[in-house]
Image: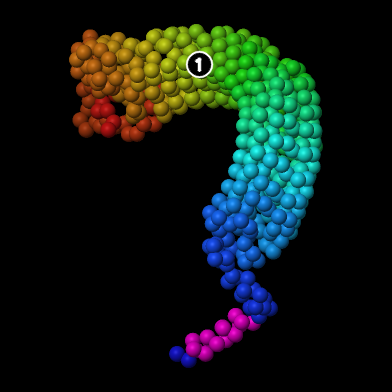
Amino acid sequence: MEGPQSSTPASLGLLLLLLLPLGPAWYVAAQRCPQTCICDNSRRHVACRHQNLTEVPNAIPELTQRLDLQGNMLQVIPAAAFQDLPHLTHLDLRHCQVELVAEGAFRGLGRLLLLNLAFNRLSALPQEALDGLGSLRRLELEGNRLEELRPGTFGALGALATLNLAHNALVYLPAMAFQGLLRARWLQLAHNPLSVLAPEALAGLPALRNHFPSVPRAAFPGLGRVVSLHLQHCGIAELKAGALAGLGHLVYLYLSDNQLSGLSAAALEGAPRLGYLYLERNRFLHVPGAALRALPSLFSLHLQDNAVDRLAAGDLAGVPTLRWLYLSGNRITQMSPGALGPAQELEKLHLDRNQLQDVPTWALEGLPALLELQLSGNPLRTLRDGAFRPMGGSLQHLFLNSSGLEQISPGAFSGLGPELQSLYLQKNHLRVLPALSDLSRLELIDLSGNPFHCDCQLLPLHRWLTGLNLRVGATCAAPPSARGQRVKAAVAVFEACPGWAARKAKRTPASRPGARRTPIKGRQQGADQVGCGVGGPRPWWVGQVLKPPV
């Protein structure tokens, strides 16, 4: 008993020795808190929300790191308003009716990372209003009344990565408006009435939902480290030659939802590392092949929902590294043989929602890495023998749903067996479908939404499905006696087919006493055995009615 009692004074003494150097000021700083605020000293957070405050409280603990003043009535942020809070990293001044930020208002906040001034009444920012914020990473100015930006306004924000100026009244961006933002990655200018963009105005930062008809040459100087550039919804009809000059680290370029009908050969020069190009929902009539030759690192090209009507030889000649090509929702009726050949690393090809009336077999030659092919929503109607043979060694996922398919030839999927994992055939007009015995490694097949006629013509499909431990969604639409039944389970319909009894007898020959049959266990075993029946002795279970999986 004496051991623990005698150690307690020693522990307290040690604690006092550790705290003495901090002095009484530490205790006071840790305990004081304005009456209108809530102070969490352990986390160094102070919240003074919606208290009708007209000035910054003067009794906030000095060690505070996060200060939330949103929803007050400050109106004016005076010079050095936070000079007694040098440890602040986050300052929230949203919805405070702020009309004026004085020069030097934030001096002393050298550690501040986030400043939120959104939804106030600021119509201008004095040139030195943001001085002292050398560590600031994010500045929120959304929902104010800013009409202009003076050159140098953000010059002291060398560490800034995100600047939000959405929902203001900006009409004009002067040259060098964003000078000094050397580490900027994201600029939001959405919902401003911008109509004039001075040369060198954007300084390499994103701009959303604005309106300027063209992007001038060298529009983004001084920001060679920019990785992502957003220019969606800007009404852009032209990208001048050399508009991207100096963007040596640019990887993502978003030009979606504009009015571009083409790109000149030099439009994309200056961004050799560009990997992702988003051009969806514009007015392109052709793939801008000449412009793409300036992008030796292009990985993903997005041209969905344009007006492209063909894919011609040479369109992809300059993009040997292309992996993903999205051409969904265009008007493509033809693809030249070898049009895709230069992109030998292509893995994803989306051609859904076009006007292809046949699988472009010859255009798909020379793609040894193709894994995914989307052809949904094309008016294909029929699939001929060997339609997918060129990609038989690689294709894993094939989408043919909603393609108006009425007939599929027995050899349509010839060559796809070794790799194909998923096949989507739902929502077509298939009444009959041959057995797909070559597809031995399927993990998913969707046949739902087809009006299958469950008669003797469908017997091969029924037998094939009984060997799969997969839910395929195939149901009978006719005859009336079988309507709604699963094709796999409609045994009564197929028992009446000629040859059913004979085949059954052939599958059950006399066997020596004690002989046992090996049951099929699991999806993969069943699928593999289907494949093994091709070109070799017929397994005992082919055509036998097996109990469908639960």
Judge from the rendering whether residue 516 lies leftward or rightward of residue 241; answer left or right: left
Q: Position of residue 71 (x, y in %)?
A: 56, 51
Pointer 1 residue: 353
User: Which of 253/232 is in front?
Assistant: 232
Q: Position of residue 417 (x, y in %)?
A: 46, 21
Q: What type of secondary structure mainly makes up the magenta span?
A: helix
Q: Check the image and name the residue furthest to the bottom.
A: 2
The answer to whether residue 33 is magenta is no
Report if residue 479 is visible in the image: yes
Q: Which residues are magenta?
A: 3-17
Q: Residue at x 41, y 11 (%)?
A: 405
Quarter location, residue 351? top right
Q: Residue at x 63, y 33 (%)?
A: 190
Q: Quadrant of the N terminus?
A: bottom left
Report if residue 158 is visible in the image: no
Secondary structure found at label 1: loop
For residue 90, above or below residue 473: below
User: Which of 535/135 is in front?
Assistant: 135
User: Which of 451/157 is in front?
Assistant: 157
Q: Position of residue 546 (x, y in %)?
A: 26, 26
The answer to whether residue 5 is magenta is yes
Q: Position of residue 471 (x, y in %)?
A: 34, 28
For residue 310, above or below residue 118: above
Q: Residue at x 69, y 40 (%)?
A: 123
Quarter location, residue 340? top right
Q: Amino acid at mark 1?
A: Arg
Neighbours of disc 1 within 10 Å: few (<14), some (14-19), many (20+): many
Q: Quadrant of the C terminus?
A: top left
Q: Residue at x 73, y 44 (%)?
A: 125
